[in-house]
Amino acid sequence: MTTPTTPPSPPARGRRRAPSRIGRAASRAAALQRPRVLLALLLLLALTCVMLLDGYLRAEVGGDERVRTGASASDVPDDVLDGGPILTFPGGQATTVSVPDKTIVLTFDDGPDPTWTPQVLDILDEYDVPGTFFLVGSMISRHPGIVRDLVEQGNEVGVHTFTHVDLSYQSEARVTREIEQTQLALAGAAGITTTLFRAPYSSETNAIDDYSWPVYQNLGEDGYTSVFIDTDSDDWKRPGVSKIVEWATPEDDEGASVLFHDAGGERSQTIAALPKYIEKMKAKGYTFTTVSGAMADQQQQEQQEEQQQQQSQQPGGGRQPEQSGGGLQAAHHKATGATLYEGKALVAAVAVAEWTVPALSVGLVIVGVAVMGRFAMMLVLARRHHRQRNRHRFSWGPPVTGPVSVVVPAYNEKECIEATLRSLARSTHPVEIIVVDDGSTDGTAEIAESLGLPGVRVVRQANAGKPAALNNGVRHARYDIVVMMDGDTVFEPDTVRHLVQPFADPAVGAVAGNAKVGNRRTLIGAWQHIEYVMGFNLDRRMYDLLRCMPTIPGAIGAFRREAVLQAGGMSDDTLAEDTDITIALHRAGWRVVYEEHARAWTEAPGSLGQLWSQRYRWSYGTMQALWKHRRSLTDKGPSGRFGRVGMPLVVLFQVVTPVFAPLIDVFTVYSMVFVDFRAALLAWLAVLGVQLVCAAYAFRLDREKYRYLLMMPLQQLAYRQMMYLVLIHSCVTALTGGRLRWQKLKRTGEVGTPAGNG
């Protein structure tokens, strides 16, 4: 054993050494991590809020389709039941107002609708007729432009709740919320509020029951005027244009509040009937007004009658009747202050939801197709790869029997280094072992030297990171083939022999081995075991056949020394030096292959925190490597081939699809809670079934025990969500900038011998 370089002498006592550049960079990176994690969580929270808002607007969240019928009306005053269609509570006393004779109050419910409401407005404008529109708050917030046009045209608006629910079933808090949210939507859309109200599913005043009466009383105390109908066109039944006109016509020249609908379904018959109805009523001498106009006319008529009576009692005396003010839109009030700005915020939030959720739905379809396409590709190509490489006649060429160099970068690996080196010493292929101690402080180098194993050299260097340690090992290597492994990894006796056989093909520049999770007895270890077998190794079979392998795992990989030096060595430009060098070899024209029989047993992270750190480094490093080699997209030759084949596949399958894959889970949970639990559950189980099929096939190819697949449903519910957060965290880091250094995971050394495979 030799030690070509010696560690630097310690600083003199009493003097504090200034932090190194690496230390300062690590401190800055650590300081940035918490805000980035919070930002990633905030992005998920924002997505959830947008979906809940969209569901609320569509009555999927908080929807209530119950409609009360046949209830008693014993508590409702007879004057109200027999009174006019306009109900007010001046001084707390219930009072009804009738529409004056020969007067029509055209009312429209359930809008605004982007298809039908503009057509109704065009008809009203053509005939110079005003209307009163009772608007649903969720529709107002989705179509604010229509509401602005409606108000500017001179029509009147009223509240028809926010989600069109029967208020007789709702709590006082829900009723208040329905009204206030609709007022906010009106404020944001048209800059107004209104005192008019019509309850969903209401009709004439004689239909008020003991359950709805308290609702009208409470709203009346708050200053609202509840509006009912005298005549119902029943246009929602689509009985035909002539029937709609007939049913909407009042009898005996009486005035009437008439109900039409400008939303809530297919309204072509309403659009066709409305002009005919207006022409008919004008021909009969009727005038058209709004609710406020009818109330003003009725008030003026009563004042005139009262004045005439006074004049008859006192000839020549009395005062002239007062003219009511406010006109056809007297119920409108200008929105100001917090109401106005909260309303604008609501409309803006709804606009975001209206664009975001459909876009996410399209993304969901794309992700679903990509996920299923990936599974199909993996199954087909993995089967082809397995059959091709396991044929009796398959050979890379003449057997590779010459010695190779094995480089083991190590930083504080005292728990694992002995098992690693002893496994290499049992290799059936001749090897030289180079342990590069990267400034360990736990005696790793001393342990390696004390073992006295033949062919082991220890090279010491100041702490400079894993890429520098690997490059140092390559410089000290004596042989043309260099095997690289981690200091916590254990090789089987035949691993090196299998790993180097592809180098019989002179076009092969690097070989990826089959990394296995050794500490799979824990729940986290079992989840990673499933991921390694299905996600990593099955992927590598596919990429091998497509000749675009993106990553040679740090736990087990072999390189031509010539190829590594040609690519400039292991770079520290990214956190994923293994991905970086692999892409560089592709661009240089070397072939990278996968050798399934070369197995290495590695110690996977044993805690969620360590797992997060490792996967964060992997995913962020992969993004860095892809960005570094982005010019391959436009290159020619081998570099261009990887750029136009391998790069899109890696971006699609390792970045885009995983980033948007949470949409599947988010939409699934959303559908289970608010839409159709059974259908959503069956869809989720179907996707899980496809994944189980792929995983079972991957386990069969690797001859693994199937019992670990029992943990796969739980893995989908917990482990996968964490991986999503890690990837989102990485994307946030990539967008905000930041650098990390080689991170050290806590080791237990429990992977002393290969775990048993089935």
Image (cartoon, helix red, strand yellow):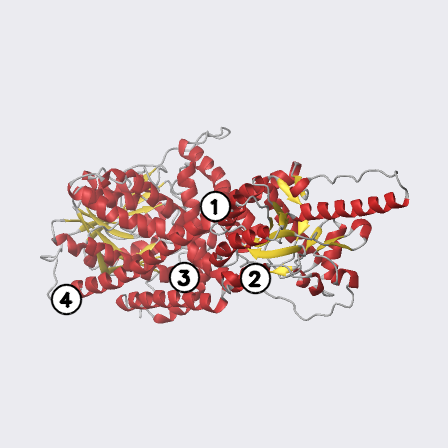
**Badge 3 amino acid:** Trp
Residue 405 visible in rendering: yes
- The answer for how far apart the CA atoms under marks 3 and 4 are is 32 Å
In the depicted view, which residue is nearer to us: 550 or 248? 248
Viewer-side label of 3, 1: 1
**Pick the front one: 79 or 520:** 79
What crowding class fits label 1: few (fewer than 14 Cα within 10 Å), some (14-19), or many (20 or more)? many
- Label 4 sits on a secondary structure element that is loop
Q: Position of residue 270 (x, y in %)?
A: 51, 57
Q: Name the front one of labels 2 and 3.
A: 2
Q: Residue at x 29, y 58 (%)?
A: 374
**Residue matched to label 2:** 246
Q: Which mark is residue 391?
A: 4
Residue 55 horizontal/vertical position (percent):
52, 55
Given this view, does label 4 or label 2 mark the residue nearer the observer?
2
Is 644 rendered above or below residue 13?
below
Which residue position holds label 3? Answer: 527
- Front tag of 4 and 1: 1
Instruction: List the residue tagged with mark 1.
Output: 40
Distance in Å between CA atoms under marks 2 and 3: 70 Å
Tag shown at residue 258: none
Crowd tier of the residue under label 4, counting other residues whose Cα lies within 10 Å: few below 14, some 14–19, many 20 or above: few
Identified at 26% across, 56% down, the residue is 540
Q: In the image, what residue type sits under mark 1? A: Ala
Element carrying mark 2: helix
Kind of residue at badge 4: Arg
Q: In the image, 248: left or right of 118?
A: right
Distance, label 4 to label 1, CA atoms, is: 48 Å
Q: Earlier in the sequence, mark 4 or mark 2?
A: 2
Residue 741 placement (x, y as % from top left): 39, 40
Q: Position of residue 593 (x, y in %)?
A: 20, 53
* Helix, strand or loop status at disc 1: helix
